[in-house]
Amino acid sequence: MIKSLNDLSETVDYSLVSSLTPDPSASSDGNDHSPREVKNGHFVPVNPEPIENPRYVIHSKTLFKDLSISDDLARADDFSRMFSGDLSQCQEPIQKLGWACGYALSIFGTEYVQQCPFRTGNGYGDGRAISVFEGVLNGKRWEMQLKGGGRTPYCRGADGRAVLRSSIREFLAQEHMHGLGVPTSRSLTLYTSETESVHRPWFNEGSHSVDPEVMIQESVAISTRVAPSFLRVGQVELFGRRSRKGEHPQALSELEDLVTHLIDREYTEINLSPLPLEKKILQLAKSFRTRLSSLITNWIRVGYCQGNFNSDNCAVGGFTLDFGPFGFIDEFDPEYQPWTGGGLHFCFFNQPQAAEVNFGMFCQSLKPLLEDDQSALEELEQIMKDFPQIIENEMKVMWASKLGMKTFEQTIFNELITLMIKTSVDYTIFFRELSGVPKDTSPLTKSFYGQNSEDKELMAQWSEWHKKWLSLIQTGNPSDLNATSDESSENLSKVMKKANPKYTLREWHLVPAYQEANRGNYTLIEELNEVMTNPYSEQSEEIEEKFYQKKPRELFRVAGVSHVSCSS
């Protein structure tokens, strides 16, 4: 059990900074907080800027347990000082400098440099995210990164801070996603400042505006997110671009070093095999394809929309990363998009296509390493081309599991989607009620918005669909899961409930939590964290009454509840 910062220091293993190349133009003291071009090197050593008068908000008891860290440590002075941005008192082997990494930006397959202040792309990267620790805990490697830890060379003129509101959203979302069984970065701790605040654009109360209308004063915060690594498609893409363009003499070797490090960090099983680099790269592409297609399928299974799935928000480890303008769907809509700036290309049902594009950019970035091997290039091209079929197969298996069917049946699925749109159903509640294997449609109406359950013609269509669904289960499932007896119905219900969560983290639950937190009351955050880390459990009647409900109609289209601007 890790009971002190000294105990934590015994797990230190800084593989990234020891095996990759620092920016040769970086300062020796880590005082590197102004925007500038970073033209080569894999990372910039930078010291975080601690928040003023930090105050404990919450820590993840689940993650602390997974890492064998004592819960008491979250409130210890030296631990809270480190994870609120002050590394000055850390003792070796914990380093006093953190690190930030650069990456490229592509949006749905289009390379961008316009948002870079230097119009070169050399200004993109971790603008306010600074990694401060890497170690091996319980046999697994973890990197710990401060979000809101101050400016880095990639800040593009911003202040490098995160605010309490967005930090609460990300903290709860990461632990909820883990509870849902979906690969994700994790939340370690959250501290806020009692005295430091910043201005952020936001919406007037009750506004339906798409764009923020006012500047509001918000408390700053630092959350620590944890992952095996924070390597992104955008990082590989940056070094792939530099190699393709021959931007400096070390460009190709830096790409090779990064990819080798990526394999070692995220795909150790490949690194252990005695294969040449070209073969390892092909194995890497196949393995990432498997992880990414599975991840996106799980997002849709639980009703999650990333909102802004650029290549720089796509972890090469194949897990959910960067909970900015995300959302869990309430009323089912294939075009659901929680981010006002996101567009249909990143909407709910288009996430497989967005993933395909990101995967394509990843593969394109690997090609400079395979230029002397035509057969390897051709195989990589085929790996790219096979992505749509791979994820389509994954999606069919997922939809079959949500419907409690042994095999996917396209016709009944299409009829269901049409009815769900026509009726306006709550996505989570509908599938959870279906998981009860109802003998008629009455339980399903719990998920219907408005007065649609009183529409006789519509209900007749639902009744017909339900009969077809029940018939397919009874004739297509094995005898222990075919709903022809009470026992087989109960068995099927248990299986379906593992695919269909009862609780998802809805924005209208989050808003009161961060509003109370702004007043210094964190009880709603604790309650949400407890409920949302057990999303498949029935929990108490009180919890069900509070959190297993449709979104109130008066909150639809309300800014900051139904849609959000890009995370601050």
Image: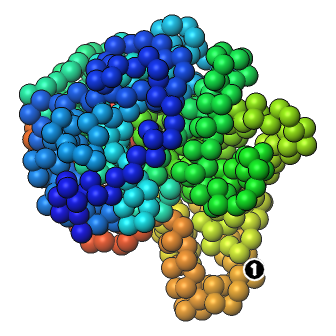
Look at 45% across and 41% down and name the residue there: 18
Query: Residue pushed farthest top?
Result: 118
Percent coordinates x, y for residue 47 in the rendering = 28, 29
Does residue 95 appear in the picture of this structure?
yes
Left or right placement of residue 489 versus residue 516 in this view: right
Given residues 462 and 534, the one toward you in this image is 534
Q: Residue at x 12, y 52 (%)?
A: 75
Q: Name the residue nearer the viewer: 490 or 353.
A: 353
Which quadrant is home to the N terminus?
Answer: bottom left
Q: Nearer the viewer, residue 348 or 542?
A: 348
Residue 448, percent from left and from top:
48, 55
Task: In the rendered view, tell whether residue 39 sits above or below residue 550.
Answer: above
Q: Quick check: 84 left or right of 567? A: left
Question: Which amino acid is tagged 1?
Answer: Gly
Place residue 148 in its image quadrant: top left
Q: Determine which quarter of the picture holds residue 53.
A: top left
Relative placement, left or right, of 462 versus 38 is right
Residue at 71% in and 81% down: 477
Residue 234 shown left or right of residue 195 in the figure:
right
- Relative to 280, residue 7 above or below: below
Q: Position of residue 291 (x, y in %)?
A: 63, 54
Instruction: Locate the C terminus by quadrant.
Output: top left
Q: Residues within 10 Å of mark 1 (few under 14, many from 20)?
A: some
- Is residue 545 visible in this depiction of the protein? no
The residue nearer to you, when weighing 500 against 386, is 386
Which residue in the structure is indicated by mark 1?
A: 476
Q: Position of residue 128 (x, y in %)?
A: 35, 27
Q: Secondary structure at mark 1?
A: helix
Q: Residue at x 50, y 75 (%)?
A: 436
